[in-house]
Image (cartoon, rainbow, N blue to C red):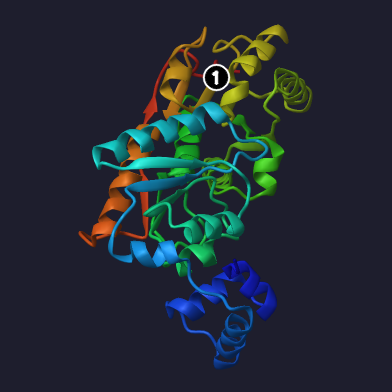
Amino acid sequence: MVKITDVARHAGVSPSTVSYALSGKRPISEETRQRVNRSIKELGYHPHAGARALASSRSNVLALVVPLRAGIHVPVVMQFAVSVVTAARRHDHDVLLLTQEEGEAGLLRVADTALVDALIVMDVQLDDPRLPLLRALDLPSVLIGVPSDAAGLTCIDLDFKAAGELCVERLAALGHRVIALIGSPPAVYVRRTAFAQRVVQGFTAAADRGGLSSSVHPCEASPAAARVVAEQLLREYPALTGVVVHNEAILEPLMDAFEQLGLRVPGDLSVTAICPDDLAENLPVPVTSVAIPSAEVGARAVDLLMKKLNGTGHIPEATLLPPRLTERASTVARAAP
């Protein structure tokens, strides 16, 4: 069976352009439209029969698109997945979990099979290559994550930029002047994953505003990598007294590494984190943290999707949840020099 990707390849355009030509959602040049139409005719492409049959009915299934890429912390992703599934059941919908890293092809495969009513998409990048297709598809979608340009989309997430700022502001208020962000694995930054990039933006902006000395250190999600970063920080920044951690997998190994290197938390080093509350509060030294509100984000993503499916209510392009910082035992005022 000829698929939309075959038409795109034959016409020398992107799959999203073919979708635009078919749906009329966005203007394309007449020359491109004619080229797409010629390819459709030559290849004998027809929209999936199931999709046509479901035009006036529903499958009561949502797709949750979570590509399990390098650097993803699966336990936190699963918290989001559970919240989506729980909220979907309240709306009498099941959830199809899609974990392959297929990009546009994966979205088209799901749309062509007509198995689902709508999409929730995670691990959003600032310049995500899936965005043109998501704007073109007739299938409603909500993104957990906010790209650089949210026009024509529906997005929700924690305000990670504000979260980074809040952690820095707390350390600054306690008198810390030399701080570091120990961040996500390098692959997450290479992909320009939106939440990680925004934490760096907030951290850097707040440190600059406060006149703090700051540095950013991506870290692989392993105890060995945590030890290497801790050693590097002690070697290169001997005046360091405050750390922000945005990497759930290494939070406890990192604190252990600092202790083994002679820095007591919080006596010598104050630590804040952006992580789930249950992790922060159950460490040997409970960590001051900004919570990742996975339950609220997942539930609200489903609610937004239901509004889109039902054509009810105002739907903003981007919804950012304000960060909430909880003070715990890992932060204290810096001792006077």
- Amino acid type shown at disc 1: Ser
> Pointer 1: what residue?
270
The answer to whether residue 212 of the structure is visible from this angle is: yes
* Figure quadrant of residue 229: top right
Residue at image location 36% in from the left, 46% down from the top = 61
The one of 305 and 215 positioned closer to us in this rendering: 305
Task: Sort mark 1 into few (<14), some (14-19) or many (20+) by Cα contacts within 10 Å.
Answer: many
Above or below, 49 against 62 in this view is: below
Residue situated furthest bottom in the rendering: 30
Above or below, 62 against 41 in this view is: above
Residue at image location 43% in from the left, 52% down from the top = 115
Residue at image location 43% in from the left, 18% down from the top = 278
Residue at image location 43% in from the left, 57% down from the top = 114
Above or below, 181 against 143 in this view is: above
Element type at mark 1? strand
Residue 8 drawn at (x, y percent): 63, 74
For the C terminus, which image quadrant?
Answer: top right
Residue 318 drawn at (x, y percent): 38, 56
The answer to whether residue 241 of the structure is visible from this angle is: no
* Figure quadrant of residue 64: top left
Q: Is residue 29 left or right of residue 276?
A: right
For the N terminus, which image quadrant?
Answer: bottom right
Residue 97 drawn at (x, y percent): 48, 40
The one of 67 and 53 positioned closer to us in this rendering: 53
Above or below, 43 against 249 in this view is: below
The one of 178 and 158 positioned closer to us in this rendering: 158
Residue 207 drawn at (x, y percent): 56, 40
Number of marks in picture: 1
Q: Is residue 100 left or right of residue 227?
A: left
